[in-house]
């Protein structure tokens, strides 16, 4: 759904009479909405004072109404804009620590690289919002609407750019996303720890390259959610119904792994005439020990290899494209000619690893 109004939405009355007994008297016409303006820190404080008067039902208060305004870099710490309207506004790099946006209309807003520690977005309209790179420790988004949405810019006839709400690269520690509507949301590369997604609608959400630790997924709808390249601990996996989610291939058991490694060694020693190439593509091999194994030309495409141990392993010409190698031990490994394009090597130990051209071939390590 897109916002097709030429100006910001009409300000709603406060949520109940106790919060704004004079709400009807304080209604503001569309002509008073702030549209397309750069807001200063001083102006922000004055607007907050007016908005708090509105919330308390004090005469001459005003329900804040903005559309496509530039609020980037401002300090919102402890400010209360509950039930305000900030349609398509740019909050990038703002400090929103302990700010209140309970029930606010933040349709299509941009929170790129914001400090959102303990920010309250409970039951807010955040359709199409962008939280890329945001610090979201203990932020409250319970009951918020984060489905697809895009603002149609003034003078345009159709939305441009992304429509899915995105949390790419966000740090979500203790974040409350319970009962959220997160259909098709993008969590690529997010770090999610101790967070609650209980009862959330996560149908079609993507967690590519994300890491989930101790996340509550009880009652969440995970149909078609994509966890193929997500790092997920056992606690998180045990808390959610992942039957209809897309997941990586499971790691082989000990006996099967032993046979795969043996067949691969034979494949190498016989010039690919006998045995079989090791195919670990799209498998979850987190914490697997491959130390000092001969795995030249093995296929690890899109595999999850978080905390895997490759110390001293022969990995020449191996395919690690788009693999997840968080904290992997690659000390002294031979990676000459290996394909590491698109691989995530966050915190991987590459001390003494050999890279570069592989003798006798045209291959060189690709990053």
Image: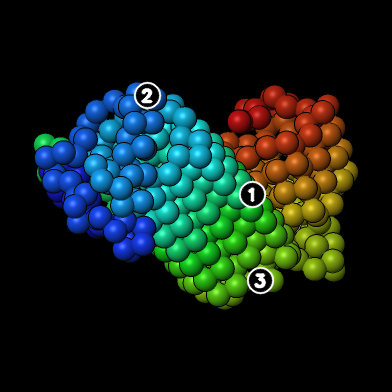
> Which residue is found at the position 80% from the left and 62% from the top?
257
Tell me which residue sits at (16%, 38%) in the image.
32
Q: Is residue 192 above or below residue 319?
A: below
Residue annotated with mark 1: 173
94 to the left or right of 15: right
Please name the residue that numbered disc 2 is placed on: 42
Q: Earlier in the sequence, mark 1 or mark 3?
A: 1
Local secondary structure at mark 1: strand
Question: At which x and y percent is residue 335?
Answer: 74, 34
| Residue 220 located left or right of residue 151 | right
At x 80% / y 68%, what residue is drawn?
253
Please tell me whether mark 3 sits on a helix, a strand or a loop: helix
Q: Nearer the viewer, mark 1 or mark 3?
A: 1
Specify which label sits upstream in the sequence, 2 or 3.
2
Give the residue at mark 3. Answer: 239
Of tags 2 and 1, the one toward the viewer is: 2
Q: Are marks 1 and 3 in contact (CB under 8 Å)?
A: no
Question: Tag 3: Cα neighbours inside 10 Å, few (<14), some, or many (≥20)?
Answer: some
Q: CA distance from mark 1 to mark 3?
A: 17 Å
């Amino acid at each position: 759904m897109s916002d097709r109004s030429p100006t910001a939405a009409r300000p709603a009355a406060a949520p109940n009479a106790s919060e704004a007994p004079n709400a009807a008297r304080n209604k503001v016409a569309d002509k008073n909405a702030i549209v397309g303006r750069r807001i200063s820190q001083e102006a922000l404080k004055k607007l907050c004072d007016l908005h708090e008067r509105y919330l308390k039902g004090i005469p001459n208060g005003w329900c804040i109404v903005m559309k496509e305004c530039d609020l980037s870099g401002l300090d919102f710490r402890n400010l209360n804009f509950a039930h305000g309207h900030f349609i398509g506004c740019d909050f990038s790099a703002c400090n929103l620590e302990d700010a209140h946006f309970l029930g606010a209309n933040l349709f299509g807003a941009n929170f790129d690289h914001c400090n959102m520690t303990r920010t309250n977005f409970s039951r807010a309209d955040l359709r199409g919002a962008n939280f890329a790179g945001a610090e979201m420790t203990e932020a409250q988004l319970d009951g918020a609407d984060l489905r697809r949405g895009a603002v149609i810019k003034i003078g345009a006839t159709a939305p441009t750019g992304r429509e899915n709400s995105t949390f790419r690269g966000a740090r979500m520690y203790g974040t409350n996303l319970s009962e959220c509507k997160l259909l098709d949301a993008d969590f690529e590369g997010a770090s999610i720890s101790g967070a609650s997604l209980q009862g959330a609608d996560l149908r079609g959400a993507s967690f590519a390259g994300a890491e989930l630790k101790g996340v509550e997924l009880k009652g969440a709808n995970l149909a078609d959610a994509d966890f193929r390249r997500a790092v997920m601990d056992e606690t998180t996996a045990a808390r959610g119904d992942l039957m209809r989610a897309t997941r990586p291939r499971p790691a082989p058991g000990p006996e099967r792994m032993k046979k795969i490694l043996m067949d691969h060694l034979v494949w190498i020693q016989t010039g690919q005439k006998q045995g079989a190439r090791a195919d670990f593509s799209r498998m979850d091999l987190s914490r697997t020990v491959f130390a000092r194994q001969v795995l030249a030309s093995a296929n690890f495409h899109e595999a999850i290899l978080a905390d895997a141990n490759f110390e001293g392993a022969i990995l020449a010409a191996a395919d690690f494209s788009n693999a997840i190698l968080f904290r992997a031990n690659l000390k002294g490994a031979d990676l000459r000619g290996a394909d590491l394009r698109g691989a995530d090597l966050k915190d991987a130990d590459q001390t003494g690893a050999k890279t570069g051209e592989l003798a006798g071939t045209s291959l060189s390590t690709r990053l």
